[in-house]
């Protein structure tokens, strides 16, 4: 493979493999290559070069959580610096029981297949840069089971609420920055501050808290605002 953006995909679904292979097609997405191996394939040595040079790994957890967790462990042994994203083929597959094992191992990036090819590729590039991306809407039951009932909005400003709303939508720091006319680094700092104030361990938890606040208010926290 070349020096472009390299995706390492572990899946047992041919349709998922086809979708990720398509990310490298077309002029707009040039320089993208995907190496795919079967989720149940224990002989990862044949793709060891791809793992060592990969930009990001995507592990499909929709079929077998045990196999997905095992593959994540093997990927980390072979390349501790490789960023890992967990894929669920539909939002309904992401329950508290299915997400918790990955969160416990420090994996905090999750996608589903509701995104377009362009959105998926943009999210993967963000993950490869070291940011956590959550493009997955949790049910109220799942978010409560994972994160408890923390999260209050009494002392949150309109901009804080708007920022949490955008985090809940699954936007990356760069996408949020474009919405609010702020730099990606400023957005990252503000999200970290909100996590501390809301006692959220990570971005996944902050998104769940935002979703719960929205449900308690009967709608979006606030319309996205542009910072002055």
Image: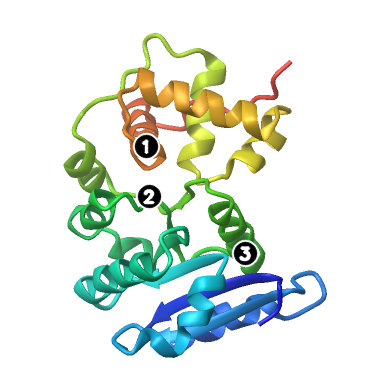
State the residue at coordinates (50%, 12%). Answer: 157
Task: Evaluate if marks 1 and 2 touch, with contact meaning CB atoms under 8 Å apart.
Answer: yes
Is 2 on the left or on the right of 64, as rendered? right
Numbered disc total: 3
Residue where numbered disc 2 is placed: 108
Which SS class for mark 3? Answer: helix
Assess disc 3: are there few (<14), some (14-19) or many (≥20) residues with their C-alpha within 10 Å of its C-alpha.
some
State the residue at coordinates (59%, 51%). Answer: 129
Above or below, 69 against 64 in this view is above
State the residue at coordinates (55%, 25%). Answer: 189
Residue 211's quadrant in the figure?
top left
Q: How much space separates mark 1 and mark 2, taking CA atoms?
A: 8 Å
Of marks 2 and 3, which one's residue comes earlier in the chain?
2
Quadrant where the C terminus sits is top right
Of marks 1 and 2, which one's residue comes earlier in the chain?
2
Q: Tell me residue 116's x, y (percent).
A: 61, 66
Above or below, 53 against 176 in this view is below
Residue where numbered disc 1 is placed: 202
Q: Nearer the viewer, residue 192 or 144?
A: 192
Task: Evaluate if marks 2 and 3 touch, with contact meaning CB atoms under 8 Å apart.
Answer: no
């Amino acid at each position: 493979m070349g020096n472009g953006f390299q995706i390492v995909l572990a899946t047992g679904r041919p349709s998922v493999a086809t979708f990720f292979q398509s990310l490298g097609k077309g002029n707009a997405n040039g320089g993208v290559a995907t190496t795919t191996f079967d989720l149940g394939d224990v002989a990862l040595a044949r793709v060891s070069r791809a793992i060592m040079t990969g930009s990001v790994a995507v592990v499909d957890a929709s079929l077998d959580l045990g196999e997905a967790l095992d593959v994540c462990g093997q990927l980390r042994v072979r390349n501790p610096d490789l960023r890992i994203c967990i894929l669920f083929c539909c939002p309904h597959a992401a329950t508290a029981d299915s997400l918790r094992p990955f969160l416990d191992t420090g994996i905090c990036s999750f996608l589903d297949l509701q995104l377009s090819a362009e959105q998926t590729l943009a999210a993967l590039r963000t993950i490869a840069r070291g940011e956590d991306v959550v493009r997955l809407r949790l049910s109220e039951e799942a978010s409560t089971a994972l994160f408890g009932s923390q999260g209050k909005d009494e002392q949150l400003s309109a901009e804080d609420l708007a920022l949490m709303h955008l985090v809940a939508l699954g936007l990356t720091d760069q996408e949020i920055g474009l919405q609010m006319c702020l730099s990606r680094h400023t957005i990252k700092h503000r999200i970290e501050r909100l996590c501390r104030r809301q006692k959220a361990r990570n971005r996944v938890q902050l998104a769940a808290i935002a979703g719960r606040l929205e449900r308690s208010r009967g709608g979006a926290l606030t319309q996205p605002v542009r910072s002055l």
